[in-house]
Image (cartoon, helix red, strand yellow):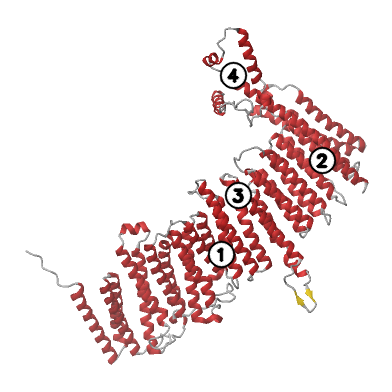
Amino acid sequence: MSEESAFLLIGLLVLAFPVLAIVAFVMTLGLRRRVQELEERVRQLAGQRPMPVDAVKAATPASPAPAEGKKAAEPVREAVAPAPAVAPVDKPSAVEPAPARPEPMVAASAQAARRAAPDKPKVSLEEKLGTRWAVWVGGLALALGGAFMVRYAIEEELLGPGARILAGLVFSLALIGGGEYLRRRPVAPAAKQAAYIPGVVTAAGTVALFATIYAAYALYDFLSPAQAFVLLGLVGIATMYAAALHGPWLAGLGLVGAYGAPLLVSSNQPNPWALALYVVVVTGAAFMLARIRLWRWLAIAAGIGAFCYGFVLGSIMGGDTGAMVFYILALSVLVGAVLIYEPHHGKTYQRFDPIGLGAVAGLAILAVSFAGADVFGHASLATLLIVMALALAAALAFDALAPAAVIAGLAGLACLWIWPIGGQLAAEPLVVVPGHLYLPFLMPDALQAYLQIAIIPAVVLLLATTISLMRYPRPQWPALALALAGAATPIFALAIAYLRIESLRASLPFGAVAAGLAVLFAATTERFLRQERQAGENETPGAGSSLHAVASASAVALTLTFLITDSPLTLAFGLSAFGAAWVSTLRPLPALRWCAAGFVVLVLARMGGAWTLAGAGLEHFPDWQDIALRYAVPAAAFYYGGVLLRRRKTDIPAAILDLGAILLACTAVVFAIRLGLRGAEEAAYPGMSLAEAGLYTALAFAASMALVYRSGATTSPVYRAAAPISVIIALCLTVTGPLITANPAISGELIGGGALFNTLLPGYALPSLLAGAAALFWHWYGRGVGKEEQRNRGMENAPFALLCGICAFVLGFVYVTLEVRKIFADGVPDFTSISSAENWGYTIAWLLYGLVLLALGIWAKARAIRLGSAIVIMLAVAKAFLFDMSELEGIWRALSFMGLGVALIGIGLVYQRLLFGPRQEPRQ
């Protein structure tokens, strides 16, 4: 060991003794101050609430002898006087009973004092300038003056290097001594509200002392790096503890100086042990001072500094991991003693402690980072397990730190996720016996270590939190944190281990473990429910029963995922959602309802871009088995799961299951249509035929009818909202599909098939019929339900019935027109050359289409359909008089007008006989 290293270690050890002395001194001052406050409080209580005269007379013995009264008064005085000094505030004395609820009297007196206290006078600008700003600027001027004096001496070469350093030391010590002298002088009452002059002077001296020591090291080489390191740290710690006398801001200055010392001192051979010991000493001093003076900001700042130096230490440790192990364990001891045990021992739970939880989280992050940098060696893994044990112990011991159990679980899960198990398994040799027989049952060492870290922390967390929740009743939020840690950690540990080891392959061992977890969590759920029923908490299930039930359902999902070939996660999660919904009917736990909804969200997230019918989102288009297992079966599971959930009530989880059922069912039908029309090889490529576009449009209209029917049969808001949306989607598909993109007249696609049975049937006829049926369905559904009930359900049927009717009318008209073209031109969608027979065919077809619409309108008693019939017939009449008269010749012209005349006369007869019959004459 070199001389500098020896001096450094000796200096750090010596540094610990004055720190302990200062701590003891400050603790004594704090205890004395608290005793004085308690004595003053007792005096105030005794003076504000004197005993009534009648009570005094009743309590005094009736003997007339004054000696007896005198003797009786002395024990009372002796029993009352020592009470403030002996009995603690939090715990009443065991000898005398505590006074009955003194808090209301104290609160009332405090409120009365606040009402009686006059308002504080406003501070004028002159007072601020004279009593505050002048002091702060003066302190800054003193510090800068010392630095400028040293610079002037260097530039003018007035003094030698040693004399300059000595002058700086004298100036610094003089300022510090002057600050202490001013502190001990009596302070005028008016000065208490102004800036604290002794603290400002002391701060100026501290800054000058820091600068002097650094100049002696950096400018003149009077100090070695180790010596400067120790001296700067000593000044920083002393400055922090001087804050106990001068104010909290001086502690911040000392903390900055102490943590900045290692950054100011450079060395060609960094010593990780020295840095670790130094930062631990500084952090411990800051923690103890913060706890004594109740300076939360100092504890937070010190914790952040120690956390950052942990990464610095990890970057310079090289192959020596001992310093990092010592650093993390020493910080764990400090955090456990100063920030965990001392503040919460014997205290009741009020709220979570963010400082303690932040310190535990910082330790966990350092431990996980250290384990990853060490490639999960034995020392780093042991350190990580110790930190996790500390977090779990803190969570079990103190309710204010219950989320520390979640932090412990997250640390273990992070370790499993970043562990390079794949590379380690690939690097290990295979075990082969003579005869070239590979023994797969012999587990590699790397896999053994990985599984141990996956199993041991998860099992310990599960057992510890479950036993604690069963034996000791806890408040709501601490119980929730413990139950979450115990339930979630094993599930996620199993899932991560499966992903890292099996990579989504079917695995019987993992499936068996998941099934065992499902049974175990089901048993603990029943135990928690029995305990809650005995305690009379049936209406509000506890955290243990709720989260363990969710864990059991999740374990079932993992079991299905691990055992089913090719791992269709949508099937596993879909069946699990139905299972959770079914169990919720037997055990009314709200968490199970949300668990079922969570599985739906996972399925939709798993599908991802699978709704894209073509493109890079699908490498292989699903076959019939995939469509059934990945989409149809989960859709049915979600549908019936939503039905089960609505038996109890209609809420958000039930709505989520309904939404998942609608999306997956539509996706399954869309994929089935594409696969059936194009085949597995061409289905993944872009493009859409007329038949495919028409079937998609027909599907949208059929879905609108199903949804509007379900909206009336159930109370689900999803169906009521999805029914109108499906009509809008159908309208968009009608316009963009059969009418524009897939229209043969625009795309030039040949109309395949025969004269009647061709691609026009699925492209136009089927969607037109379904659109008309949807229009009638919306129309009749509106008749059967009153307008008031329609408004209550959020449905106005007339606009959607009209949209469906318009789509049916347009699609039917296009079908009739293109069918004529198919018959006369054999499917060539080129309208540049039209024969006379084809031209006559259009007129007759339009007239027949109008007559069909008229008959349908009369049968359905729908005036809108009859108006559509009138539009088509008027179009045929206009074509006959404006086009056929000039373009047709011979027999075709005669037939056109003869057919038109017969049709119009027939329509007139229908209107006269059926719609507008003879009116009765009014009676005279």
Residue 265 position in % (x across, y down): 84, 46
- Element class at badge 2: helix
Q: Nearer the viewer, mark 3 or mark 4?
A: 3
Question: Mark 4 or mark 1: which comes first in sequence?
Answer: 4
Label 3 and label 1: CA atoms lie apart by 27 Å
Which circle, 1 or 2, is nearer the viewer? 1
Three-letter code for the amino acid on which mark 4 is drawn: Gly
User: Where residue 47 is drawn, which disc sits there?
Assistant: 4
Q: Which residue occupies the foreground of this view, 773 or 627?
A: 627
Q: How far apart are the alpha carbons under marks 4 and 2?
A: 50 Å
- The residue at which mark 1 appears reads as 605
Earlier sequence position, callout 1 versus callout 2: 2
The quadrant holding residue 200 is top right
Can you see residue 460? yes
The amino acid beneath tag 2 is: Gly
Numbered disc in front, either 4 or 2: 4
Residue 481, numbered label: 3
Label 3 or label 4, whichever comes before in sequence order: 4
| Rendered residue at 28%/86% (across/down) | 896
Tell me the amino acid under the disc marked 3: Ala
| Quarter of the image where one finds residue 793 | bottom left
**What x and y, as percent, mark residue 662?**
46, 67
For disc 2, the marked residue is 233
In depth, the one of 5 and 494 nearer the eye is 494
Q: Nearer the viewer, residue 26 or 695?
A: 26
Q: CA distance from mark 4 to mark 1?
A: 70 Å
